[in-house]
Amino acid sequence: MAQTIAIISKWIDERTPSYVSACTVHTIMECQRAEQMRRAINGAGLATPDGMPLVWLSQWHSQLPVERGYGPDLLLALCELSIQRGYTHYFYGGAAGVPEQLAQTMTMRFPGLRVVGTYSPPFRPLTASEDDQLIAQINQAKPDIVWVGLGTPKQDLWMADHRARLTAPVLIGVGAAFNFFSGQVRQAPRWMQRNGLEWLFRLSQEPRRLWYRYLVYNPLFVLLVLTQLLGLKKYRLNIKTSEV
């Protein structure tokens, strides 16, 4: 987390345009399914291991002390740092009222935090005109960080598609953090998070929405890991770009 925050801070200070994808098993499986999603994740300035299975696999493969790059914790850490650095924030995503509630919660938790805008998109693709207006609105607000809470894969595809048109130096996809901190959905206890059981807690909270993600994608992920370990499936690794 400290390394992630240091990199993002440098991007902001140097006005280097980039985006961050917090990756879970769901993210990896969407990358397996769609080339466009794979390009979006590989194009991120940072792709952090948000899910504990990815942390464990990274530790096993690299033999390094890999830590979790958890989206909600990253949001809290950067809001706290912003009080010292003066970074400004824009919240994009969530159902009607959610980004506004998130902004209120964060400004109450971190007095002095500067939120320069919020937007809750409709549950349909924006028209070209609406998208142009949104881009103009965000650019006019001049945030340092645009937080994107559309969920995977929408938020990653949105960041990849809009990165070149936004003047904000950093876009960060944090998925469920919008619902957690606005009080829409309960967050799993820390002991469940540490032990890789957050998926079970979330499934119990939203079974109709999340059943496919956890009951289909999770077993498929395990199967793919096993086939890779057994040498039955191989992936091309471009060392120069770290693109898989």
Image (tube, rainbow, N blue to C red):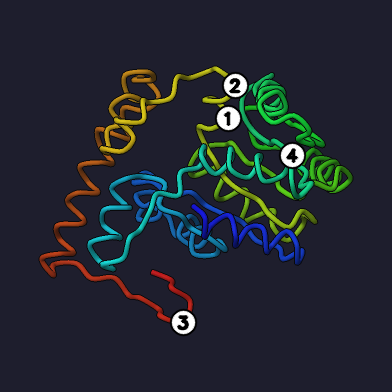
The residue tagged with tag 1: helix, strand or loop? helix
Q: Residue furthest left?
A: 230
The numbered dot on residue 161 is: none
Give the mark nearest the N terminus, 3 or 1.
1
The residue tagged with tag 3: helix, strand or loop? loop
* Kind of residue at disc 1: Phe
- One can see residue 27 in this view: no
For the point 68% across and 36% down, the residue is 92
Q: Which residue carries the number 3 mark?
A: 240
CB under 8 Å between discs 3 and 4: no
Q: Residue furthest bottom?
A: 240
CB under 8 Å between discs 2 and 1: yes
Q: CA distance from mark 2 to mark 4?
A: 15 Å
For the point 68% across and 20% down, the residue is 101
Give the mark nearest the N terminus, 2 or 4.
4
Give the mark nearest the N terminus, 1 or 4.
4
Give the mark nearest the N terminus, 3 or 4.
4
Q: CA distance from mark 1 to mark 4?
A: 12 Å
The numbered dot on residue 182 is: 2
- Left or right of 210, for residue 8: right
Q: CA distance from mark 3 to mark 1?
A: 34 Å
Q: Which residue carries the number 1 mark?
A: 178
* Kind of residue at disc 4: Tyr
CB under 8 Å between discs 2 and 4: no
Q: CA distance from mark 3 to mark 2?
A: 40 Å
